[in-house]
Amino acid sequence: MHSAYSCGTPAGSRSARVGVEVRASYQGPDALNRVDTVPFGFRTTVVPGEYLPSLLLRIAAYVGEPPVAISRWCGLGALRWEDRRRLDMILPAEVARSIGIAIGCSSNELMDGMMRSFINDALAPGVDGLPAHAKNWTRGSGTRYCPQCLAARPAVFLAHWRLWWSFLCETHLVPLHDTCPACGQGIADPALMEAHPVDPSSCRARLDDGSRCGHDLRAAWHEAPFDNFAPVVRAQVAISAAWKRDRETLEVFIPDVQHLFPTLRGVGIALLATNDIPLIAELAELDPSQLQGLFDETARVGTAPPKNALAMGALMAAAFALMFAPEEKVRHLIRRLTFARPSGQGQTERGPGSATTLLGYWPGVGPRFRGRVLRAIDQDLPAMQRLVSGSAVRAEFDEPAVAAYIGFLMPHDSRRNPEWTADHIPPLLWTNWAAPLSVAGGADPETLQRSLALGLTAALAGTYRDAREPEVIAGIGRRLRPAMLGTPAQTTAILRQLGELARYLAASTPHINYSTRRQHLPWWQLLNQTHWDMICASVGTFSGGPRRLLNARRYLYLRATAQPLSALPTAWAVVANGRDAAEHTEFQIRMTAQLQLALDAYLEAWLAVTIDAVNAYDRGNGTCPAAVWEPPRWAGREAMHLGPEIDDLDVPALHELVGSGVTTVRALAAAVHRTPQHVRWALRRHPVPSDQPVFPIDWSAHLREVPWWPYLPATRITQRKGHETEEDMTVLVPYGWQGAYVYRSVRRNYLIDWH
């Protein structure tokens, strides 16, 4: 018996003799505190990855003792039945020390044989510390085995054989066995408190007559091994490398490896639900006849994986093909599997056939495979669902990272920390994006630009799957109407661009908080007459009268807040019919590059001062003092269905026309063959250059912190806290279009809100 279970230790060796001597002098678990040497001489026989209870049974068989004797020797007798039951999940420190002393191994070697080493990868624990069967296809009891491995290393059962995810022996490239070849029953768990000696390599299943089966599990039929490059082998190698966290040996790059097992389960459930065995065999490159009768029929699909190892291997190979094969080759299969499931009966919140319902047929899959499913069903979804779900987005931009080839930023998973919100999207979409996306028309340019911004806000909200803003998404179909999206090709191009931009923003740091700028900055103090005169003198242009100063204020306000002309404060509003509108348009057209630079420098200095004041009560989070910001522009093959880019016009000719005295937008647009709105955007982006030198101004000496106190309070509420008196007040400000709600204490004033 000793020669069978020594695992490399000859029966006549010193280790074997030591084992006999220890058996004769066995004195119970308390003796562990009195030994200074390894009792059994097993230091060199601990097999990496061997299941801990299997190791204890092997030792018992080696020394010729019943398992209960070794269990008590290692301190397991003092544990409750419940604690012994989850020994491979929760190993008390004192028990680990006892086992380590008894067999001469380290705690790390013991941990390698515990099921808890697979937590967060191939195994999910329940609240009781035991594997949770309903999570991630976790096995509750029993094991698979390889007869050839048992023949080479008798009685050594590896821990990973107990995982459903382990279906192939990577040493011999044959499927693992699930049952005893003689009695057909599963392999029972080791009985650590068994009072009689047991042979760990024999089947211990109870037969109908009450006897034990006793079949030698090393004896089995011959099986031809798989080829090294067979899909089943490649799937098993990648899966085992994932649970070992051995990323270097992965043949397939798995960028979101933390989602690997949930995704395998979700794809497996979708494959099982269709009961399409020929498709599974085709993807696994197996003969369908090999799989007939191996898949179990269950009342609820997906609650458990196939019990048969070959069936599980074929299922995982098929799942790997759908997950990692070139998307163009499997997209039609993913769509076919998605629509092979029957729709839910009755009315639901989102309705049968919605993106959410269809994704539910692939439960728990990771973000990258979710993208594959959405792209496969993209043309089957309504336009607004395509926008929110991002189904039109290219795979390179798939979450959680933006495409690496664009090289704009280092990708990171921002889904858990949604920093970009609707407040960071300008009311009018950035002009470098709005220009090409305005190809379809369907509304006036300002309305279309605003609708595109709302569409981007909805797409951005859709990227935050764990923190969506339903109010942002609701009603987007009434704002971004089909007429604004144009033909089917134009619709796909616009939705793709908005979805890709949303993913770029979600993976970057927000810059300007437009809501804070609009609501909480004291715009009435912007650009007084003295500062305007200084700016004009620094660029060699005339300052003009009050109306030119008013147009400069309008320009700065709209530039900083990205709002339409109609959103100007009442005191600065443009009179539609009259000289005021013409002068405002001429001011924008004749804006020189030097004057724009000087105004931007003033605006950034003014914003820096006022934002510091607003930050005192934490209203400026996400706001930077930059005058303007816009994301980089890109376009793929869909550019052929979009309009011209903002710089796609003859800028020198445009400047020459303005210099010659042409100041009507329609005349300029006709000359350069672009729309009037495109001309406005282009001149704002590329103002007419001037020959005058620029003398920069240091505004730090001319701007000071916003003084709240000079304005008379309209209402006042005073309250005393300890030795301090604090006041809440509403103050009136110049021009009468806004008020400020201020919290005033004895130390300083804090702006609360504008209204």
Image: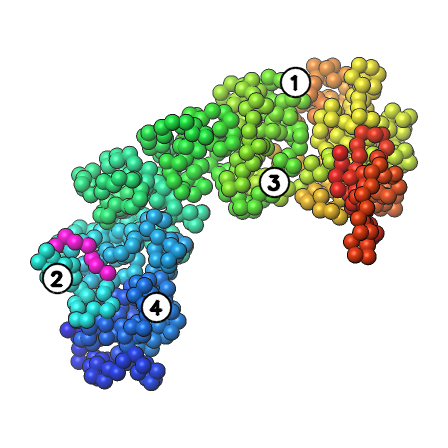
Q: Does the magenta-highlighted stretch encompass residue 187?
A: yes
Kindly report which numbered mark, 2 or 1, lies closer to the viewer in this rendering. 2
> Residue 661's spot in the image, x, y percent?
82, 18
Label whose residue precedes the other's in the sequence (3 or 1): 3
Kindly report which numbered mark, 2 or 3, lies closer to the viewer in this rendering. 2
Residue highlighted by disc 1: 444
Q: Which residues are magenta?
A: 181-189
Residue highlighted by disc 2: 212
Q: Cα distance, mark 4 to mark 2?
A: 30 Å
Count of numbered labels shown in the rendering? 4
| Position of 275 relative to 547 (above/below) | below
Q: Cα distance, mark 2 to mark 1?
A: 85 Å
Label whose residue precedes the other's in the sequence (4 or 1): 4
Residue visible at 68% across and 39% down in the picture: 513
The mark found on residue 420 in the picture is 3
- Secondary structure under the numbered disc 3 in the rendered image: loop
| Position of 679 relative to 561 (above/below) | above
Kindly report which numbered mark, 4 or 2, lies closer to the viewer in this rendering. 2
- Secondary structure under the numbered disc 4 in the rendered image: helix
Q: Cα distance, mark 3 to mark 4?
A: 47 Å
- Secondary structure under the numbered disc 2 in the rendered image: loop
Report the side of 305 relative to 423 (left or right): left
Label whose residue precedes the other's in the sequence (2 or 1): 2
Residue highlighted by disc 4: 110
Q: Cα distance, mark 4 to mark 1?
A: 72 Å
Residue visible at 18% across and 39% down in the picture: 292
**Residue type, mark 4 in image:** Leu
Residue visible at 60% across and 29% down in the picture: 454
